[in-house]
Image (tube, rainbow, N blue to C red):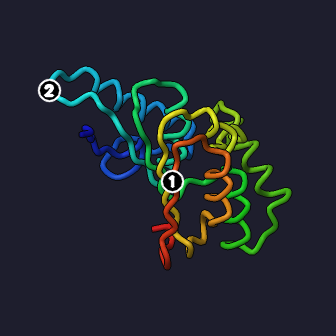
Amino acid sequence: NYSSLLFDLRAFGDSDGDFTSLGYFEKNDVLGAIDYIKSRDDINQNLGALGQSMGAASLVLATIETNDLKAIILDSSYATIHQVTGRRFKRTHNLPKYPLATLLTFFGGLLNDFNAFDLAPLRYIDQVNIPIFMIQGDSDKLVFIEEARRLYDKANQPKQIWITEGADHR
């Protein structure tokens, strides 16, 4: 008994834009979608939301700023952008996390006018006070299963996690 609205975050899919903040400003896209649904009299106002990867991180950040969601589904959310950046440096270029990921996280946020270290759903998930369903692939090479478990452990009840065998990030 939930309404649903499917949309792309800025600079993804068919949405306008060529800049992504990897979740920080995209939380405003989520809040805008919620406001749009709330403005419609013909749509059920029992709102739930699903986000995947960066969309899941954006959803956590948006959820703590609204009381309009009744439940959320987080699919493959990173715990911190700093951690994911470090993993990408290692996986793609075989370079160490420190100091490169730390520098990129710091200067990426500075250049785009936000603190990129705040892109950390792990820091905020315990402020979410609605049901959370988490999905994580056990073969995900971008967001490790340990990150999902850390998010899950810190999340409030009611919560549930589903680990999908053989599933990668995509």
x%, y% of residue 139?
A: 56, 76
Asked if residue 117 lies left or right of residue 76, the reply is right
Screen quadrant of the N terminus: top left
For residue 75, side relative to residue 14 (left or right): right
Q: In the orientation shown, which residue stands out farthest toward the right?
A: 99
**From mark 1 to mark 2, how far is it between C-alphas?**
31 Å
Which residue is at the front of the view, 13 or 139?
139
Quadrant where the C terminus is found in the figure? bottom left
User: Which residue is labeled 1 in the image?
Assistant: 160
Q: Position of residue 50 (x, y in %)?
A: 40, 47
* Mark 2, other Cα within 10 Å: few <14 / some 14–19 / many ≥20: few
Secondary structure of residue under mark 2:
loop
Q: Give the residue at x 66% y 43%.
A: 120
Locate residue 35 relative to residue 130 in the image: left or right: left
Taking the spot 73% from the left edge, 70% from the top edge, the residue there is 90
User: Mark 1 or mark 2: which comes first in sequence?
Assistant: 2
Q: Quadrant of residue 129?
A: top right
**In the depicted structure, whether residue 13 falls above or below residue 131:** below
| Mark 2 lies on residue | 42
Q: Percent from the top left, x then y, of residue 94?
A: 75, 75
Q: Residue furthest left?
A: 42
Instruction: Give amino acid for label 2.
Output: Asp
The residue lying furthest to the bottom in this view is: 166
Above or below: residue 35 compared with residue 120: above
Report the residue at 79% width, 51% height from top: 102
* Element class at badge 1: strand
| Left or right of 144 on screen, residue 52 | left
